[in-house]
Image (cartoon, helix red, strand yellow):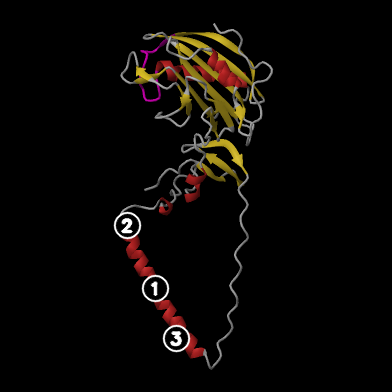
Amino acid sequence: MSMTPPPGWYPDPKAPSTERWWDGAAWTQHRRQPAPQGPPPSPPAPVGPPSSAGGRGKLVAVIAAGVALVTAIVAGGIVALGGDEEDPKTRTAPSSAQPSAPPQSSEAASSAPAPSRSDDPSRVTDELNGITLPVLDGWQKAEYVADDYTFITTPDTYDCPFDQGMCRRGTVSTHTVTGTDETDPEALAKDDVKDAADRAYDTDSIGRRPFGGMTGHKVVASRQIGVAGRAGWLVRWKVTTAEGAGGYVQSVVFPSSSGSEALVAVRCTLDVSSESPPLTDLDKIVKGIRAVDGTGGGGVGSTVGPSR
């Protein structure tokens, strides 16, 4: 039975000399040069013909060593068969019936970027997209979320007003823009904010309608913006819902500063509530985005202007 390989770097099927990031379901646009390999092992020293005097003694030694080797292999096989748990490194690769998936390797899991490797409580790192984001007062690094793309949330949960479940006042998530040939950040941000609003305030990823559905929206911001030293585009909606007071949904799309410079979308959601952080936090989060090397930040046009 074949298994889908875990996220990780694998040889690019279209360019074997490079490695490409597999997200666990599909190839992304992130590529890198493979790490240099170590020098090949030295060949074994040649063995000359045995002398007539020592030939018989060497033959006996070789036979004895062979018997010991066979005994060790048999004993090792018995130990391996008797283990209670499978070593992850012994799992087999997917069958050739899945040509679109990369080959599984034990190295992939260890090389997969973690959602955050930063010990700084005031920042969270998205290593795949090459950015860090600020964790403002009233927010926290994401815990116990249902996906790998939400990096920041508000600390507390509350009962969703419609379908059963728990909701949060605010979230910040990131993802690489894929599945389209469009490269204009403005067009992509306008498309992405609609999907973000649907997921947050209409029907979520598991089919729930926490707010009874979205009943309308108003565009409150749409403009060019500097993000991590790159030119991007920001779109913000104010949405209304069947239940609850609605909220704000924001999408910012810009080129990554790392790898193949794939386009990145940063989504923010914020309930309209006296218990939510201030709306100006959405501006501060975008302005505080940095490249992983610490460069960049909001530049010309980096503020949204008065929020409505």
Q: x and y percent of residue 140 in the render?
A: 47, 25
Q: x and y percent of residue 37 in the render?
A: 61, 55
Instruction: Write the residue at 50% across / 25% down.
Output: 173
Q: CA distance from mark 1 to mark 2?
A: 20 Å
Q: Which residues are magenta?
A: 203-215
Picture mark count: 3
Q: Which residue is the site of mark 2?
A: 83
**Label ID, residue 60:** 3
Disc 3 packing (10 Å; few <14; some 14–19; many ≥20) = few
Q: CA distance from mark 3 to mark 2?
A: 35 Å
**In the image, what residue type sits under mark 2?**
Gly
**For residue 28, which quarter of the picture?**
top right
Q: Are marks 3 and 2 in contact (CB under 8 Å)?
A: no
Q: Taking the image as drawn, is residue 262 in sight?
A: yes
**In the image, what residue type sits under mark 1?**
Val
Which element is circle 1 on?
helix
**In the image, what residue type sits under mark 3?**
Val
Which secondary structure type mostly characterizes the magenta part of the structure? loop
Question: Mark 1 or mark 3, which is nearer the start of the sequence?
Answer: 3
Question: Mark 2 or mark 1, which is nearer the start of the sequence?
Answer: 1
Q: Which residue is the site of mark 1?
A: 70
Q: Are marks 1 and 2 in contact (CB under 8 Å)?
A: no
Asked if 117 appears above or below 290 in the picture, the reply is: below
